[in-house]
Image (spheres, grey):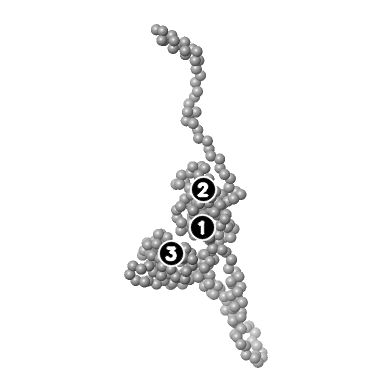
């Protein structure tokens, strides 16, 4: 499966068949896990793991996965006892390709003469095959996200990995910026925070860094290494006084002679 292509197909389908937010969150969590398994046909995952990755509670996960199965996004089965359920993600790219293939149109003008030779294959078959090939060409040849781990490792704030991974994929989906751009922007932002001494509480969250397009300010060619501000010496704030040291010496000698 192609992560980016599946993500695009998912949001294309939501335009016509909306899902509740828990189902959307669970689908993203399952996609992330499937990606880490190397896109195995089936994989097992515990509900406790899905709770952490989706932000849902156990009951919401059970309702959401039933909705996803009902709408054809996934297939899952319980194994009973304390064993984790088995999941299979249906390829939305394949489903959308099949659904978008138009049916053969009837001939508007009837044939005046019967065909003398029977056709070995119905006329609609080659037309459908041709349309399927055209549909496949419409799918953009986008490579799956391969450097997200590197991006997340160099980013100065290691929080919200799941949300960050989704935001990272959406930026790539636009096709304007590549993975090398995003990785370099994360490195530059980390350098900026280090030089400026930014506390973690004032740093951009990684998902907001991408979704709110802060990363553009730190892209190669636009980012400029900052110059740290010089710290003021607190003693410099006191006014300087002028002293006549010879007069002070005379006064001291005079006082000692008493």
Viewport quadrant of the C terminus: top left
Tell me, for residue 26, which label it has, or none.
3
Tell me, for residue 212, which label it has, or none.
none
**Residue 13 vertical placement versus 225 (above, below):** below
Q: Residues within 10 Å of mark 2 (few under 14, many from 20)?
A: some
Report x, y in % for residue 77: 39, 72
* Gap in angstroms between the C-alphas marked 3 and 2: 31 Å
* Gap in angstroms between the C-alphas marked 1 and 2: 16 Å
Residue that carries the numbered disc 2 in the rendered image: 190
- The residue depicted at 43 percent of the width and 68 percent of the height is 43
Q: Residues within 10 Å of mark 1 (few under 14, many from 20)?
A: some
Report helix, strand or loop for mark 1.
helix
Report x, y in % for residue 27: 45, 65
Do the residues bearing badges 3 and 2 touch, measured as CB atoms within 8 Å?
no
Do the residues bearing badges 1 and 3 touch, measured as CB atoms within 8 Å?
no
**Residue 246 vertical placement versus 54 (above, below):** above
Q: Nearer the viewer, mark 1 or mark 3?
A: 1
**Taking 60 as reference, is 216 left or right?**
right
Q: Nearer the viewer, residue 240 or 79?
A: 79
Find the residue positioned furthest to the right: 113
Tell me, for residue 148, which label it has, or none.
1
Report helix, strand or loop for mark 2.
helix
Do the residues bearing badges 1 and 2 touch, measured as CB atoms within 8 Å?
no
- The residue depicted at 52 percent of the width and 73 percent of the height is 95
Report x, y in % for residue 184: 56, 52
Report x, y in % for residue 29: 44, 63
* Comes first in the chain, label 1 or label 2: 1
Report helix, strand or loop for mark 3.
helix
Q: Nearer the viewer, residue 110 or 139?
A: 139
* Comes first in the chain, label 3 or label 2: 3
User: Can residue 101 be seen from the camera position used here?
Assistant: yes
């Amino acid at each position: 499966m192609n992560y980016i292509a599946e993500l695009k197909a998912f949001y294309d389908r939501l335009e016509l068949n909306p899902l509740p937010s828990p189902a959307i969150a669970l689908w993203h969590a399952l996609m992330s896990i499937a990606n880490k398994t190397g896109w195995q046909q089936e994989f097992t995952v515990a509900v406790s793991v899905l709770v952490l990755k989706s932000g849902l509670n156990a009951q919401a996960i059970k309702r959401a996965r039933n909705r996803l199965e009902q709408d054809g996004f996934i297939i899952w089965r319980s194994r009973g006892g304390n064993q984790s359920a088995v999941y299979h993600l249906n390829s939305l790219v394949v489903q959308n390709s099949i659904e978008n293939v138009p049916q053969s149109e009837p001939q508007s003008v009837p044939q005046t003469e019967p065909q003398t030779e029977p056709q070995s294959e119905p006329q609609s078959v080659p037309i459908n095959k041709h349309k399927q090939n055209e549909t496949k060409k419409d799918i953009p040849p986008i490579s799956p996200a391969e450097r997200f781990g590197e991006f997340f490792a160099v980013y100065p704030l290691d929080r919200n990995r799941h949300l960050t991974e989704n935001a990272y994929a959406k930026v790539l989906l636009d096709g304007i910026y590549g993975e090398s751009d995003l990785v370099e922007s994360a490195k530059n932002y980390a350098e900026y925070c280090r030089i400026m001494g930014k506390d973690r509480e004032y740093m951009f969250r990684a998902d907001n860094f991408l979704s709110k397009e802060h990363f553009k300010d730190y892209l190669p060619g636009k980012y400029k290494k900052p110059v740290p501000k010089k710290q003021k010496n607190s003693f410099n704030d006191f006014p300087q006084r002028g002293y006549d040291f010879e007069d002070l010496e005379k006064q001291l000698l005079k006082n000692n002679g008493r």
